[in-house]
Amino acid sequence: TSSGVFLLQMGWGDLGAFGEPSKETPNLDQMAAEGMLFLDFYTANPLCSPSRAALLTGRLPVRNGFYTTNGHARNAYTPQDIVGGIPDSELLLPELLKKAGYTNKIIGKWHLGHRPQFHPLRHGFDEWFGSPNCHFGPYDSRERPNIPVYRDWEMIGRYYEDFKIDLKTGEANLTQLYLQEALDFISKQQASQQPFFLYWAIDATHAPVYASKQFLGTSQRGLYGDAVREIDDSVGRILKHLQQLGISENTFVFFTSDNGAALISAPRQGGSNGPFLCGKQTTFEGGMREPAIAWWPGHIPAGGVSHQLGSVMDLFSTSLSLAGLEPPRDRQIDGIDLLPVILQGKLIDRPIFYYRGNELMAVRAGLYKAHYWTWSNSWEEHGKGIDFCPGQSVAGVTTHTQEEHTYLPLLFHLGRDPGEKYPL
Amino acid sequence: TSSGVFLLQMGWGDLGAFGEPSKETPNLDQMAAEGMLFLDFYTANPLCSPSRAALLTGRLPVRNGFYTTNGHARNAYTPQDIVGGIPDSELLLPELLKKAGYTNKIIGKWHLGHRPQFHPLRHGFDEWFGSPNCHFGPYDSRERPNIPVYRDWEMIGRYYEDFKIDLKTGEANLTQLYLQEALDFISKQQASQQPFFLYWAIDATHAPVYASKQFLGTSQRGLYGDAVREIDDSVGRILKHLQQLGISENTFVFFTSDNGAALISAPRQGGSNGPFLCGKQTTFEGGMREPAIAWWPGHIPAGGVSHQLGSVMDLFSTSLSLAGLEPPRDRQIDGIDLLPVILQGKLIDRPIFYYRGNELMAVRAGLYKAHYWTWSNSWEEHGKGIDFCPGQSVAGVTTHTQEEHTYLPLLFHLGRDPGEKYPL
């Protein structure tokens, strides 16, 4: 069975199926209606890079090295910040899937290190079309180069120079390129009858937000909504392609997000975390609870809903299980195999850990969440207008200093109070 | 064609179909999947009584008399507050439907006046099972009597005395009584082949919240969730009953709410307004945007979604239209006939007015909303712990004094910013 993982930066509240009031994601809503919604699914860190490392290793960032290297509870993009990357000692999902004859492709943002030793093709992927980092820029290429775009080993150009992004209009056709790559890869694999792992990790909804011309101005939600609509359309096309090629029943597909919507970029460049507290960078539900949909026609009953506490790390163990492989036994794996949940409706007892950098901020067990530390961001940052919780303020919870509660954890019941407004 | 209106006090975010994270409303979600979701549907006032008057008269509270009688921008339950009621000069929907041979029944809370001249059977209803007011109490019946329960003209008992509500456990079987009344009425009408208007206006989710024994403890959301589950189950049974009797294709059914969830009662006694700002009593979206579902098998295409700006007042005009009647011409009617929207997918240009008492606080036209006045509640109330916007605070918007913006209205784009956090 092949696996496909759609990993976006979208908030819980960005999908119609999860209550976005404009309801502009018909394809994702259809995916949910045909598959299973996970309502209690989490990323492993409220920031892109460590959560991507966690997905591909099945391990918490504090184990795989993607945690802060300075400053308490600081979120870090990569080890040693921007020069580090995924250690050779880590076993990535695509490396393991190779043993089962899989062809592995990453489309989009790698984010596990941009130096040569961290190249995705050194870490199990067979193909790559995308970039090592976010499409930040444009930069002056003499002082600081723009982010490169790779096809496999070769750098084929740079964002803004060879791959245009018009920040004024928000126009860029990158999602269409990434879509075509996915369709072509799937066609090739179907023709060769080889199992595959496709990791479609594009970042159109990451600031600076962009969309193709045909989607610009089509959303009630502005540019961010245009980008969401284009992603939604792309997901629909990819799923339809699998069906038309007759391989949808042999392909397990999962859609989720690497962190909550970035509220510092809202409303033009950031999305919605629905009824949850705060956003990206925080360990409140808005920072780490993600939209999540499993789709596998003929296996997953349509319209399913699961309250299993899930994690992006589970996609590691689940994809291995689908390939008939066991997770490595020489190290701690934090992901669990979700197939018993998906196929037999089981609920597996497991906690969710909420880290910021190297600091365990909170733990969820069942419907209870205990905060050992609370912090939104510093007064200094907040004073500069950087707000991780715009319009939200819960006394003693969305604190602007790091508040310790390890002796008497701040407890919430997420069933009665999903918005973390009423400490018990 | 018969009409059924379910009118509850539930928030936009209380239904799974609208993004409630526990997703415990399978029957309402199914109703939405089989019918049409209205995503931009409003009540006429953020308080029960005036919005019920607006629904039944098709007119804004400032026209039908249900507005404040003292205190600027004060929400008033009834004219002259608790002693007033619906004037004889108002024409109510059931009065008009009689001309088309309808039998009209109200089950639940009337709320348009408790004195004899305001009795629902004097205002067009043929049958009543329910109470004139909310089930507040228990009261010492010597000093202040408990709220009475009527069957038609006859008072058959009182809440807490004859109709038990256990505030300690939250147990009361009232929703089951109200469900059975609905099923029996529908059976009787089907047997006599008479068209009917059923107004199922129960208030199990209004504080003090209750649920029947079989639903207690069944929700992740606590007692409020138990009440929602019981309502959801009841709605499912009523719709199934219509189908089993073979009259679902002749019965137009609409589900909505009389105001946003009462956040002052949350989390144990109050619900969720999803991503919207504040709750009941306010003219922010959380106070007035409502969950809304139209259901009419064989007429409404399944899975429909409408962005029509709709109002509870439209149920007046739509129900008349279904009965082949014209709205009265001797007075201003604020509701519009939604049938062209529902059956032909039309969008009708019309504004939404947000009143608090007699004060026009805000207007929505298209995706823009202009606030002429902002106010959550007074500092005095707020100091006593009464909070209409718990955990939410938007500078200059959720003000604790009545702030006038009539010269330069505070403008929001509800597509890009449904949470009213970013004034333009």
Image (cartoon, coloured by chain):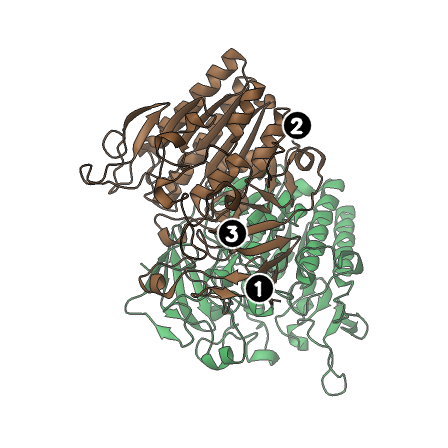
Chain colours: A brown, B green
- Quadrant where the N terminus of chain A is found in the figure: top right
The residue to which callout 2 is attached is A299
Residue B346 position, x and y percent, is 45, 42
Q: Which quadrant of the rendered structure holds the C terminus of chain A?
A: bottom right
Extreme residue in the top direction: A192
Q: In this view, does A240 lie above or below A209?
A: above
The percent coordinates of residue B213 (x first, y second) are: 80, 60
Measure how far apart labels 2 and 3 are at the Cα level.
34 Å
Q: Identify which amino acid the numbered label 1 is placed on.
A: Thr
- Mark toward the start of the polypeptide (3 vs 1): 3
> What percent of the width, then of the height, locates residue A218?
36, 39
Q: Which residue is drawn at 60% across and 40% down?
A: A332
Q: Which chain carries label 2?
A: A
Mark 2 / mark 3, whichever is N-terminal: 2
Q: Which of marks 2 and 1 is in front?
A: 1
Kindly tell me whether residue A20 is visible in this rendering.
Answer: no
- Few, some or many C-alpha atoms within 10 Å of disc 3 (few <14, some 14-19, many ≥20)? many
Q: Are marks 2 and 3 in contact (CB under 8 Å)?
A: no
Q: Which chain carries label 3?
A: A
Label 3 SS: strand
Residue in the foreground of this view, choosing between B342 and B205: B205
Say which residue label 3 marks: A355
Nearest to viewer (mark 2 / mark 3)? 3
Q: Residue A244 carries which label?
A: none
Q: For the residue labelled by badge 1, is the local secondary structure a helix, a strand or a loop?
A: loop
Find numbered disc 2 in the image and state the secondary structure of the residue it sits on.
loop
Mark 2 belongs to which amino acid?
His
Mark 1 nearby-residue class (10 Å; few <14, some 14–19, many ≥20): few
Report the residue marked by disc 1.
A406
Q: Residue furthest right?
A: B162
